[in-house]
Image (cartoon, rainbow, N blue to C red):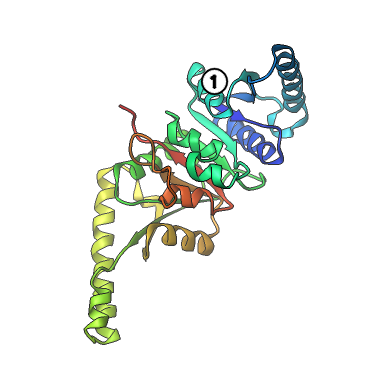
Amino acid sequence: MKILAATDFSTRSQRALRRAGVLARDLSAELTLVHVVDDDQPSDLLELERREAQRYLEEQMVSIAELQGLRCSSEVVAGDPFDGILKAAEERSIDLIVMGSHRKQLLRDIFVGTTIERVIRTAACPVLMVNAEVEHSYKKVLAAVDMSQPSARAIRTAREIGLTGDASLSLVHGFDAFAKGKMSNAGLGKDEIARYVATERLQVGTELVAFLEANDVGIDNWSLRIKEAGPVEAIMEEISQVAPDLLIIGTHGRTGLIKVLLGSVTESILRSVDIDVFAVPPVRE
């Protein structure tokens, strides 16, 4: 198991390094700390910045308690943060990238996304976005499932990597009771509408269990939570109720669920939650 923790030496990145250290210890993994310096500057300044960054990385390996005693190395890469992180991950055959949530840049982010969103969109391996302070291994894990192969793969990957461990496990799925609005407009009573919604929920639950069993998710250990809501609303509501410290989510398509325009599920979640998010890309062709 090989973990890459990317840092820009911010407080957000400090949390990511600490979480990466906890995971590396729990999973007996090899850890690499990576910092990317801007290569669009004179060579002498680039070399100075590279040396300073390397020195600071080595200081953090000694000063951060969670990193001490691990198989830990460091590397400074020149380039764009997004490309540099992916290059380092590819060269080292990394299994998991750990990053802090990045500062938003308003209009620029609408068109190109933050660094971590671009990494999640393109990386061949899973990415863990660290939002919360690191106190312990994950205790409560929530997984979003939409009955697609990417969502099932995300859950299996989290289990195989070892992120779920001994945590309390919950699955959330949102569904739309399509005929509810028409029934209301037709003047049908609340009881009849409620029976229809209950029947839909039961049917969705049956289909969800069959999907999870067919995709080797191992549902015996999971608490299933089925909500009449859109995917983002269902996830956010469940986070509010369960208070998990990790959310598992899969991405769709060749470039992931994150799109150039606003509105995708993963983008909305990444920019809204204050818990850690484990995002798993689909299998690349």
The answer to which quarter of the image holds residue 38 is top right
State the residue in front, 65 or 93: 93
**Residue 200 in sight in this render:** yes
**On the picture, is 35 further left or further right than 203?**
right
Q: Is residue 257 above or below residue 28?
A: below
Q: Give 273 or 210, whichever is nearer the viewer.
A: 273
Q: Quadrant of residue 7?
A: top right
In-front residue for pair 114/92? 114
Label 1: which secondary element? helix
Q: How many marks?
A: 1
Relative vertical location of residue 41 with respect to residue 281 in this rendering, above or below: above
Q: Residue at x 74, y 12 (%)?
A: 44
Q: Measuring 42% from the left and 47% from the top, which residue is drawn there?
A: 261
Q: Residue 50, how many percent across, how many down?
A: 71, 18
* Residue for point 60% across, 30% down: 5
Q: Position of residue 219 (x, y in %)?
A: 35, 50
Mark 1, other Cα within 10 Å: few <14 / some 14–19 / many ≥20:
many
Residue identifier under label 1:
88
Question: In the rendered image, is residue 162 in sight?
Answer: no
Q: Residue 275: give x, y in percent of width and height.
A: 57, 50
Q: Is residue 118 above or below residue 169?
A: above
- Which image quadrant is residue 98 in? top right
Residue type for callout 1 = Ala
Question: Residue at coordinates 54% horizontally, 54% vertically from top-left?
Answer: 272
Quadrant (top left/top right/bottom left/bottom right) for the C terminus: top left
Left/right placement of residue 171 relative to residue 89 reads: left
**Residue 103, percent from left and from top:** 63, 43
Q: Camera-side residue: 267 or 20?
A: 267
